Amino acid sequence: MNILFIILGVVSTIVLLLLLTAALIKKEFLLEKNITINKPKRDVFNYLKLIRNQEYYSVWVMKDPNVKLVYTGIDGSVGFKSSWESNDRNVGIGEQEIIKIEDDKSIEVEIRFKKPFEGTNWARTTVSELGDSQTKITNTFFGKNKFPINLMNLMMDKMIGKDLQQNLLNMKTILEK
């Protein structure tokens, strides 16, 4: 019986520490990754503003060759939606919608996840000219997690950051061919 109380005490202490940590952590998160592409800014922006092009560079789309993609609206314009459905837990079910475009500058999408978890986040991709044939792409992913799920914010870069950077590397490879 003493062992049961010890185990219960240890588990309770761990849970209490996790909840206390979550209470001290910001609910908002922000990840930012960037890359330089050796192409003119206009060419880069015209490619990345088309959500359908994600089929060629997004690691999440490529994780499931059987992912069902549905597009609604005019690609590269506000209101365009891309929905996905996959049996792969790493891909899940959700949609993204272009909510803002500043021509030759930035595109912002709202990402609504439905499975394996529900949530809404945002991504902004900005391009800036470094020279006649060099463009810097900055990809920012941000959102908010409720208590105690905000504990995940501590691991957000490890969970999503490498995929964001890989997307940029894939896009660089495609655009610099």
Image: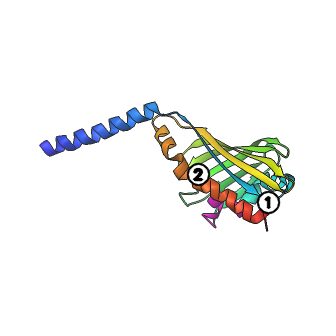
Residue identifier under label 1 = 38
Counting from the top left corner in percent of width and height, residue 134 is at: 81, 55
Q: From which residue to which does the magenta span run?
A: 55-66
| Label 1 crowd (10 A; few <14 / some 14-19 / many >=20) | some
| Label 2 crowd (10 A; few <14 / some 14-19 / many >=20) | some
The quarter of the image holding the N terminus is top left
Q: Is residue 55 visible?
A: no
Mark before the other along the chain sequence, 1 or 2: 1
Image height of 43 relative to 14, above or below: below
Counting from the top left corner in percent of width and height, residue 107 is at: 77, 45
Q: Amino acid under label 2? A: Gly
Q: Mark 1 falls on what kind of element?
A: loop
Image height of 70 relative to 25, above or below: below
Q: Residue furthest front?
A: 131
Q: Is residue 61 visible?
A: yes
Within the image, what quadrant is residue 132 found in? bottom right
- In the picture, the disc for residue 161 is 2
Counting from the top left corner in percent of width and height, residue 154 is at: 49, 43
Viewer-side residue, 25 vs 93? 25
Front position among marks 1 and 2: 1
Q: CA distance from mark 1 to mark 2?
A: 23 Å
Within the image, what quadrant is residue 100 found in? top right
